[in-house]
Amino acid sequence: MSTDQSTADLPTTNANPHQPANLVHLQGSQLGLCLCPVCKKLNTSKHSHCRRCYSPLSTRNYASIQQSWALLVTATILLVLANIYPITLLTNRGVVTNDTIFSGISHLVQTGMFPIAIIVFIASILVPWLKIVGLATYLAAISFNLPISKRKLMVGFHIIEWIGRWSMLDLFVISLTVALVNMGQLLDAKPAPAATAFALVILLTQLAAKVLDTRLLWDRLEKTHDTN
Amino acid sequence: MHEIDDHDSIILCRSCDLAVRKRALPSSARAICPRCDTALYDTPYCSINGMLALCVAALIIFVPANLLPVLEIHFLGSIRTTTVTEAAIAVWAQGYWVVGLAVLVAAVIAPALLILSILTQVIIVKLSLNATFWQRIYTTLLKNHGLITQMTMLEIYVISFLVSAFQLSDFSDVYFGMGTFSFTMLFAIILFLQREYNLEHMWSYVDEH
């Protein structure tokens, strides 16, 4: 397995030759350098396009905070709807029951399938809400300069990026169930409106995390010189 | 503004824009950003032949994984089976095309594109196709690699077999078939393919020209 090795060996510059190397927190923007957003090639900021893949370069994308907020607010509204409205419609011997995400999980608990109930609970309720709260905290920290440890925020952000996709689990289960359970009045499963809302929540929150230029959070270091 | 004479030895953290001096790493070690803990780079190595083998294996197993039924239920004498694509179309047919499309992209289209994309890249590198036409295709594939990887969600689909099986076993008998096995194998092969694949290393072939 990979052993993480941190390279604290930072470029020593002419400006501060006496300062210990690991205390200089120089950013690319101060050195006149920037990464290509597409292929991560190092470029000088004076160029307008990447010298490797010809994508347009930008030192910072300040509009990305607004875009991310907008996507996040939309996702929050949709997530509330996804939790209120039924996500599946089950007909069992003529009796029609609407299941919301939550009632589906409580049904699993009642039938004693705890491990499955926990998996579905994490994927369908915990992950989407954590993602929204986490992203909101992250965006608020940039927008309002909240005194939260940047290191912890960044770790949280990487977790959110990785875990977000697991919400798709519920949609896969619904599609398999709908395809298999189609015996008319006897036993029949159909998707319900919350399914679309839930799919859009996943799409929008993933986009909100993807558009955001995380470098904006770390620019505050220049002003306050805190290293938390 | 400070002047840096040697640009190739410096890299910037993609998350926090910190300038870090790049140095050689032992194999299986990974450099992380000293300020924000983002993974920066690891030993840029990937086996082209190994990836070619995995791509061919993935292409072969892709056919039964998508044509054979992945789940089968027996309920009061009636038998229902479904493939991954049929499951997506079933939701689409009910009018929930957003959900159907999401399932189709995550479980069928993106994995197929991922295999074909890596296969094309590997062939271009292996045969050293230096014509502008091939190099343009190569760059386009690399640019879109991140997006395709993000949309591929086979691991989640494999877990959803288990969740569905448990939920359906409440009122019917559930059976797994060769389709389930093939799909799980497809997931495993693509997992190894993605471990072998190194985007930074693939980009370095463009630098050489």
Image: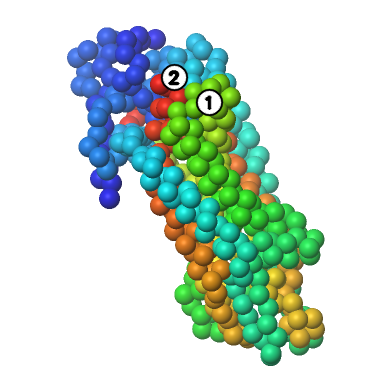
Type of the residue with mark 1: Gln
Please give the label number shown on residue B135: 1
Instruction: Residue A125: tell me if it is visible.
Output: no
Percent coordinates x, y for residue B14 in the rendering: 43, 31
* Element carrying mark 1: helix
**Residue B1 % position (x, y):** 39, 10
Residue type marked 2: His
Residue B32 in picture, x, y percent from top left? 32, 37
Identify the element where label 2 is drawn.
loop
Q: Is residue B73 above or below residue A64?
A: below
According to the image, label 2 marks what residue?
B209
Rendered position, A10 above or below A189: above
Precedes in sequence: disc 2 or disc 1 = 1
Query: Decide: marks 2, 1 in contact (CB < 8 A)?
Result: yes
- At 75% from the left and 56% from the top, the residue drawn is B97
Left or right: where B31 falls relative to B150? left
In the rendered image, residue B49, in percent from the top left (x then y), is placed at 38, 42
Label 2 lies in what chain?
B
Instruction: Say which residue appears at 69% left-offset and 65% top-offset.
Output: B86
| Quarter where residue A67 is shown | top right
